[in-house]
Image (tube, rainbow, N blue to C red):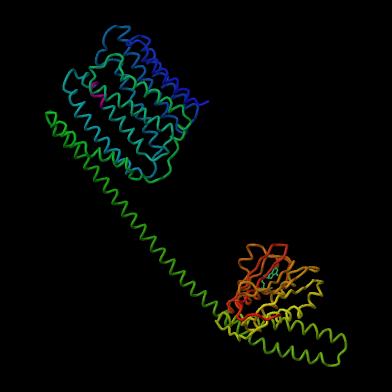
């Protein structure tokens, strides 16, 4: 059950009952006093119920509201028990005036724990509003009251407007403090505003106040709303330190400041228009104070701008340094990369000559009449020398590519022939792994291409398909034509490639997780080389694959001439 809502409803009903009862009746005063006392009790109850980290302000509110309430009771006692008008000052005044400091200190304590780092500017804005309000209070309410009556009367009469200045001061700080505008916050602000409003209206014409008046509605509602604020769960947030957000010069804040600044001239004009004696000294002092505050505010803004500019300069300098370092580092990396390519090219070149010689001599030795054991040894040596030669050739090829040295020798190529050759050459390997290797060749036009390089691509694709397909699987190579391009699809039922790896598959030395996990040998150069070759022919090389289900590589070449049968 929402206590605040129940209290609000009960409070509104009580206010309505107050106005429904006969005016100036004892019952009416009882209702009034009960509402006041209930607000005091609600403040304390709220603090106990919701246990905010700072409870003191709510106890102080309770004390302040209780003092007001006691003042109300005493005020009524004069009428109903002692049957006379309250003297000035009366005991009721003592309690009323004692209530204000409690409320003010409570509000100030709340503001202190809400305030963030941006205090100074908020304070100057608040001070401007308070100075403007104080000027009006002094000119229109306090000054006059200090002229008539006994010292005690003067002090009491001018204390009320002075207390309103203090309370408004606390309210303004409260309103200008950056914080979450919770429900409790709004109720509390509305309540203080109502209190000040009623005090001010009463202050302007105290003589017209009878025991009950419509103005009571403002005081009564102020009590009720205060109680609601205390009983709403969000009252806890009012003691939580606010986020360090910068107060923006919002339109509302700007309008408030404009009103504050216009106060001195406005007071002057009102006095002149009403034919009153112009209070030059207080107006001048008020205007002076406001000017001083504006200057302070301006200085703050200029300091902030300077600070911002300095921070920006620093940030820019840092960014420039970082960029320079990055450029230098890039340069070094490029240089290192170039040196590495040169080194690989050099080594590969130097390795190729002795390797070719080794394979040549091993082949010669195999032609000799050697016993089976030696033949077995020589065959192993020949196989490994071949593998080394392939690797060295790949490295050398990549080094040439990096140096931008890919030279093609284009010719009319019958792709069906090349595909058939590649498949035939790898049939023994397929048979060794019991892989069904099939070939489907459509009639396609010839293409303008470097036959050797196209062969290299197909060898790579088909041998990859066989390498990455487990025993007993299937590999199908098909040749088709579609929309002016010839496709060679190499589809396998192998280990497949993960989606993340597919994006990096055509990079140099990249090997997919699925291959590395199974420790399948390779260098990660074949696909890179194949794609470069495909693109050099204005074609493309792409992949569709699903982990664990197989892959299809598509090699596309543009058609140059029509109607050649496979
Ligand atoms: P290599 O085969 O020497 O590792 P490639 O450049 O030919 O180098 O292939 C790069 C990587 O792509 C392989 O290591 C493998 O992870 C993945 N790959 C290529 N073809 C297939 C395929 N048919 N099935 C699964 N993975 C493949």
Residue 83 image-quadrant placement: top left
Dominant SS of magenta comes to helix
Image location (x, y in percent) of residue 329:
49, 71
Front position in the image: 544 or 12: 544
Residue 205, above or below 421: above
Tell me the quadrant of ligand 1. bottom right
Farthest front residue in view = 563
Q: Residue at the location (49% across, 26% down)?
A: 48
Residue 157 part of the magenta segment: yes
Total residue callouts: 0
Residue 479, above or below 65: below
Front position in the image: 553 or 11: 553
The answer, for residue 25, to whether it is visible in the render is yes
Image location (x, y in percent) of residue 501:
64, 65
> Left of 253 or right of it: where is 270?
left
> Left of 291 or right of it: where is 470?
right
Image location (x, y in percent) of residue 472:
81, 68
Residue 82, above or below 392: above
Residue 218 part of the magenta segment: no
> Left of 315 or right of it: where is 458?
right
Image location (x, y in percent) of residue 129:
27, 36
Query: Could you tell me which quadrant the C terminus lies in?
Result: bottom right
Residue 536, above or below 209: below
Residue 559 image-quadrant placement: bottom right
Q: Which residues are magenta?
A: 156-161
């Amino acid at each position: 059950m929402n206590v605040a809502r129940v209290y609000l409803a009960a409070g509104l009903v009580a206010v309505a009952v107050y106005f429904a009862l006969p005016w100036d009746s004892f019952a009416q005063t009882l209702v009034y006093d009960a509402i006041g006392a209930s607000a005091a009790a609600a403040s304390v109850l709220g603090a106990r119920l919701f246990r905010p980290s700072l409870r003191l302000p709510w106890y102080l509110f309770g004390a302040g509201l209780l003092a007001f309430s006691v003042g109300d009771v005493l005020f009524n006692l004069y009428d109903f028990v002692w049957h006379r008008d309250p003297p000035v000052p009366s005991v009721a005044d003592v309690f009323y005036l004692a209530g204000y400091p409690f409320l003010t200190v409570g509000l100030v304590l709340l503001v202190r724990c809400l305030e963030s780092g941006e205090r100074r500017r908020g304070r100057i804005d608040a001070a401007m509003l308070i100075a403007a309000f104080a000027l009006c209070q002094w000119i229109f309410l306090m000054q006059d009251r200090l002229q008539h009556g006994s010292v005690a009367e003067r002090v009491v009469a001018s204390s009320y407007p002075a207390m309103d200045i203090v309370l408004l001061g606390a309210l303004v700080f409260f309103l200008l403090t950056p914080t979450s505008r919770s429900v409790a916050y709004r109720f509390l602000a509305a309540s203080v505003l109502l209190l000040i409003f009623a005090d001010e209206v009463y202050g302007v014409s105290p003589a017209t106040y009878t025991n009950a008046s419509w103005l009571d509605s403002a005081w009564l509602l102020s009590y009720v709303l205060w109680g609601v604020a205390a009983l709403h769960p969000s009252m806890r947030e009012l003691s939580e330190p606010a986020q360090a957000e910068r107060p923006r010069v919002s339109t509302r804040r700007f309008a408030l400041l404009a009103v504050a600044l216009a106060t001195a001239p406005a007071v002057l004009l009102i006095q002149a228009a009403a034919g009153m004696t112009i209070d030059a000294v207080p107006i001048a002092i008020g205007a002076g104070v406001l000017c001083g505050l504006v200057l302070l505010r301006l200085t703050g803004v200029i300091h902030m701008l300077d600070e911002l500019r300095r921070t920006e300069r620093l940030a820019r300098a840092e960014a420039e340094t970082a960029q320079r370092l990055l450029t230098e580092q890039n340069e070094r990396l490029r240089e290192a990369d170039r040196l590495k390519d040169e080194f690989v090219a050099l080594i590969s070149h130097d390795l190729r000559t002795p390797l070719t010689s080794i394979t040549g001599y091993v082949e010669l030795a195999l032609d000799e009449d050697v016993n089976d054991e030696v033949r077995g040894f020589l065959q192993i040596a020949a196989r490994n020398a071949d593998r080394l030669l392939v690797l060295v050739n790949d490295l050398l090829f990549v080094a040439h590519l990096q140096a931008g040295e890919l030279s093609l020798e284009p010719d009319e190529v019958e792709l069906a022939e090349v595909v058939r050759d590649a498949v035939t050459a790898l049939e023994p390997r397929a048979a060794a792994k019991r892989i069904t290797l099939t070939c489907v060749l459509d009639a396609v036009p010839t293409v303008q291409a470097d036959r050797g390089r196209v062969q290299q691509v197909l060898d790579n694709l088909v041998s990859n398909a066989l390498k990455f397909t487990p025993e007993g699987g299937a590999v199908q190579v098909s040749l088709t034509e579609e929309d002016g391009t010839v496709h060679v699809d190499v589809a396998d039922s192998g280990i497949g490639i993960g989606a993340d790896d597919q994006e990096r598959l055509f990079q140099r030395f990249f090997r997919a997780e699925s291959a590395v996990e199974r420790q399948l040998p390779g260098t990660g150069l074949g696909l890179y080389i194949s794609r470069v070759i495909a693109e050099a022919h204005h074609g493309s090389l792409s992949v569709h694959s699903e982990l664990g289900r197989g892959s299809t590589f598509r090699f596309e070449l543009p058609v140059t001439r029509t109607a050649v049968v496979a």
